[in-house]
Amino acid sequence: METRELTCVVCPAGCRVTVTLDDAGNVTSVTGHTCARGKTYAESEITHPVRTLTTTVSIADSADGAHMLPVKTNKPISRELLFDAMRQLKGYVVAAPVKTGDVLIHDFMEPGVDLVACKTIV
Ligand code: SF4
């Protein structure tokens, strides 16, 4: 049996949550949360942590003279994929113009996850 403590980051209350796992790594109890969202977050954070990737990529041919475009994944991806995702985006160049919300890469790192533009650049 193992006990892990974490801070719920779903809302600013920042509840301290304790998760207990059995020897097989299955969650057996969650305590300290004050709402259902906190329980869901804690279980996910322990068993399958995910993060939304936010970064910048290069942009070419911008009339604005921009060189970098902020981007993000439209859904969280496995935390263990973040470094590989950053490696894949190194050297990736988008051609202007781009609008906020444009999908740059479909199925990025995981099926159903898109890399989208976070800024309009002409
Ligand atoms: S458990 Fe609920 S109230 Fe506490 S930080 Fe998480 S979301 Fe907020």
Image (cartoon, rainbow, N blue to C red):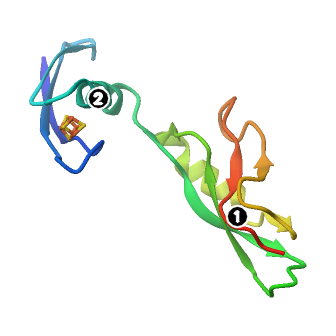
Query: Which quadrant is home to the C terminus?
Result: bottom right
10 Å crowding of disc 2: few (<14), some (14-19), many (20+): few
10 Å crowding of disc 1: few (<14), some (14-19), many (20+): few
* Dot 2 beta carbon under 8 Å from ligand 1: yes
Q: Is residue 65 above or below residue 54?
A: below
Q: Is residue 102 above or below residue 38?
A: below
- 98 on left or right of 20: right
Tell me whether the residue at label 1 lies in contact with that at label 2, contact meaning CB atoms closer than 8 angstroms.
Answer: no
Residue occupying image coordinates x 82% and y 64% = 98
User: Which residue reaches farthest bottom?
Assistant: 65
Residue flagged by tag 2: what amino acid is it?
Arg
Q: Secondary structure at mark 1?
A: loop
Residue under label 1, please give it.
Answer: 90
Query: Which quadrant is home to the N terminus?
Result: top left
Tell me the quadrant of ligand 1.
Answer: top left
Q: Is residue 63 above or below residue 68?
A: below
Residue occupying image coordinates x 54% and y 49% = 82
Give x and y (percent) for residue 50: 45, 38
Residue under label 2, please give it.
Answer: 37
**Towards the viewer: 103 or 4:** 103
* Dot 1 beta carbon under 8 Å from ligand 1: no
Q: Quadrant of residue 61?
A: bottom right
- 68 on left or right of 46: right
Residue flagged by tag 1: what amino acid is it?
Lys
Tell me the tag on residue 69. none
Give x and y (percent) for residue 116: 70, 52
Residue occupying image coordinates x 24% and y 31% = 38
Q: Is residue 37 above or below residue 71?
A: above
